[in-house]
Amino acid sequence: MKYSYQAFTKAGKAASGVVDADTESAAAEQLRREGLFVSKLSVTAGGGGSGAGARARVKPGRNRLKNVSTFTRQLSVLVGTGTPVVDALQALENQVQDPAFKATISDVRRRLEEGSTFAVALEAHPRYFDAVNRSLVAAGESSGRLDVMLKRLAELTRQQLRTRNTLVGAMVYPALLIVVAVAVLILMMVFVLPRFSGLFTTLNVPLPPTTKALMAISTALTSYWYVALGGLIALVVGVKWYLGTDHGVRTVDTFLVRAPQLGKLTRSFATARISRLVGVLLDSKVQLLDALDLTREACSNSHYVELITRAKDEVTRGEPFSGALAAGGGLIHPSVCEAVRNGERTGQIGTVMLSMADFLDEENEVILKSVTSLLEPLILIVLGAVVGLVATSMFMPLFDLTAMAGPGGGGGGQ
């Protein structure tokens, strides 16, 4: 819900605008954190709003990570050359093409002009700027090294974007092959096989078991297509509902980290991401316990959330961080555990984890390319085998009929 407000900054300057919050007290608390003293707060007409504050809450598009990566990289360059943050944001706002992200930058700039800190202004847009981003910005503001922190943040988001593009690029061709295979099979079952069915009925030839099975499936699809369609829709809705439950999420997370080959790749990618996050945060002078909290928020797999939670508890009790990672049941790559153990001795955990993240990212790219290079011909082989089975099942009765009708056949003697 959107609330319009009138308030005063700590300097006594009047401020007004629109804030998005679930309740009136939450809106007041959000404004208080931004350093504003609220004098009037009311629900906007129709729950909507106008201006930059309302426009900034457009749902992020598919290019969210790409927008954030480009934004932080360009902002780090501008701030590094001495450009004030507000002016840098204005310049970037003029360049952005995405309406939702353009409105977000505009709202962040407006909040800075009203006296808010950069980190607090970013906090109003958690869909674009997560806790790690805001923490690095806050550390840069407090230390006076905002340009350095923005550069590190740009490197972090760029690596995240590169990893995502690597995964998506590797799966595009196999996914396309699977879609084509399914489409070909459906077309053959619905349009091709019924024609053969009439031919076989007219010729009254004996059918092999595979041909009978395919004809039965084809008849079911053409005669009861609405049942098949309804069943498919019910299956999709049921799977989506199940994946939204805690048990469903846990099942998928367990499959991803335990499945043969896939689990190894998933664990390697997750280890690289955790190493990079913790390394960047520690290298930015964030305390280890705070770095673990932020890393836990950035983890999407429940097993790694539990691992980071246990690691934080053990570190709080004075146990070594490397021991907590090693006790994760194989979730963290052993080389990372050993590297962290050496980093604890030298006091360079952040630097060591960043080096391990670079190594793992390079290794993961090679492994992923190798896996996809094997997966593509495997899919083609399976597709060819299925199509060949269907074709053979359809033409085999015709071959038998030709053999029976030819010289020496069952009905050809004199």
Image (cartoon, rainbow, N blue to C red):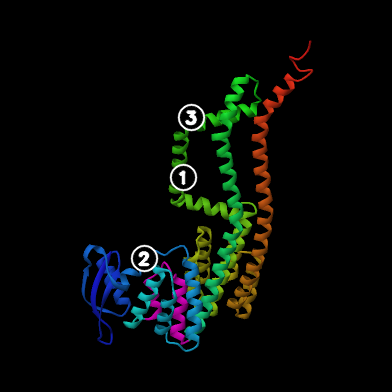
Q: Quadrant of residue 338?
A: bottom right
As measured in the structure, the alpha-carbon distance from the residue carrying label 3 to the one carrying label 1 is 22 Å
Q: Secondary structure at mark 3?
A: helix
Q: Of tags 3 and 1, which is closer to the observer?
A: 3
Bounds of the magenta span? Answer: 117-144
Q: Of tags 1 and 2, which is closer to the observer?
A: 2
Rate crowding at label 1 as few (under 14), some (14 to 19) or many (20 or more) other CA atoms within 10 Å: few
Q: Position of residue 50 (x, y in %)?
A: 27, 70
Asked if residue 400 lies left or right of residue 142, the reply is right
Q: Secondary structure at mark 1?
A: helix
Query: Residue at label 1?
Result: 236
As measured in the structure, the alpha-carbon distance from the residue carrying label 2 to the one carrying label 3 is 46 Å
The quadrant in which the C terminus is found is top right
Q: Main secondary structure of the magenta part?
A: helix
Q: Position of residue 286 (x, y in %)?
A: 49, 78
Task: Kindly identify the amino acid type of the residue bearing the numbered disc 1.
Answer: Val
Q: Position of residue 99 (x, y in %)?
A: 39, 68
Mark 3 or mark 1: whose residue is earlier in sequence: 3
Residues at marks 2 and 3 touching, judged by CB atoms closer than 8 Å: no
Task: Kindly identify the amino acid type of the residue bearing the numbered disc 2.
Answer: Val
Q: Is residue 382 above or below residue 301?
A: above
Q: Quadrant of residue 346?
A: bottom right
Mark 2 or mark 3: whose residue is earlier in sequence: 2
Query: Residue at label 3?
Result: 223
Query: Residue at label 2?
Result: 58
> Nearest the camera: 180 or 318?
180
